[in-house]
Image (spheres, rainbow, N blue to C red):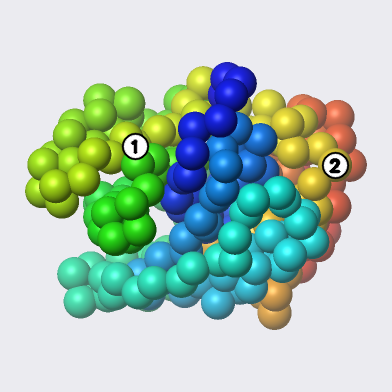
Amino acid sequence: MGGGSHGGVVALVSGGLDSCVLAAELSRTHDFVVPVYVRVGSRWESTEQRFADEFLRRADLRGVRSLRTFGFPMADVYPEHWSISGNGIPAGDTEAGAVYIPGRNVVLISKAAVLCAMEGIGRLALGPLAGNPFPDARAEFFEAMGRALSMGLGHRLEIISPFRHLTKTQVVRLGAGLPLEWTCSCMAPHYGLHCGDCNKCVERRGAFVEAGIPDPTAYARSEGI
């Protein structure tokens, strides 16, 4: 991510492995980090937000402030989408594109960008990884969105994605030593546990195996991949 200090940064922290490790990395290169969680109505949000809060508390990262939570309800836009309805949640054997949520980063960035403008913060960070196939996770999109929001808000804003060249396995290695058991990468949590079967759980299991690091995650279904 480069050395030196870059002032403050707002970080979109979903509670997932990638965004939690991102918050830790940002704390090394910025004066302060404002972690933001945006609730849109997804079925897993209560579990995810609880994990995000607990991760940040246990990690005790320098300059990382308490989690800020905002609402941006989307159930009225796509009420039948699996992320809202819970029907047809992508299983572990589905392709990466199956987990696409239309406009997710557009929504999250829009809300967080207004916070940046209100609090005079010039950077907004997200954690998409290498190979992310979605149109709102590309460097070109972030650059264009940053320009548009800077114009519309009258506030210079840079949108950064420091992990865009990293794989999930590399992020696991980068986060070794952090309380990764308090990150949530599941689309169908079961009583606070990762389900173990959904696309995100299988991806998470595989990343720990490839990284050669013991997986501390509590899965409702604990068998191997």
The answer to whether residue 31 is left or right of residue 116 is: right
Residue drawn at x 47%, y 60% is 36
Which of pointers 1 and 2 lies earlier in the amino acid sequence? 1
Amino acid bearing label 1: Ile
Residue at the limit of the structure toward the left, as seen here: 152
The answer to whether residue 8 is left or right of residue 110 is: right
Residue drawn at x 28%, y 40% is 157
Numbered circle sitting on residue 177: 2
Q: Check the image and report above or below for 118 versus 175.
A: below
Q: Position of residue 199 (x, y in %)?
A: 56, 49
Q: Check the image and report above or below for 68 versus 169.
A: below
Q: Where on the picture, by quarter, is residue 25? A: top right
Residue at the limit of the structure toward the right, as seen here: 214
Q: Secondary structure at mark 1?
A: strand
Residue 199 appears in the rendering: no
Q: Position of residue 121 (x, y in %)?
A: 37, 48
Q: Position of residue 85 (x, y in %)?
A: 37, 75
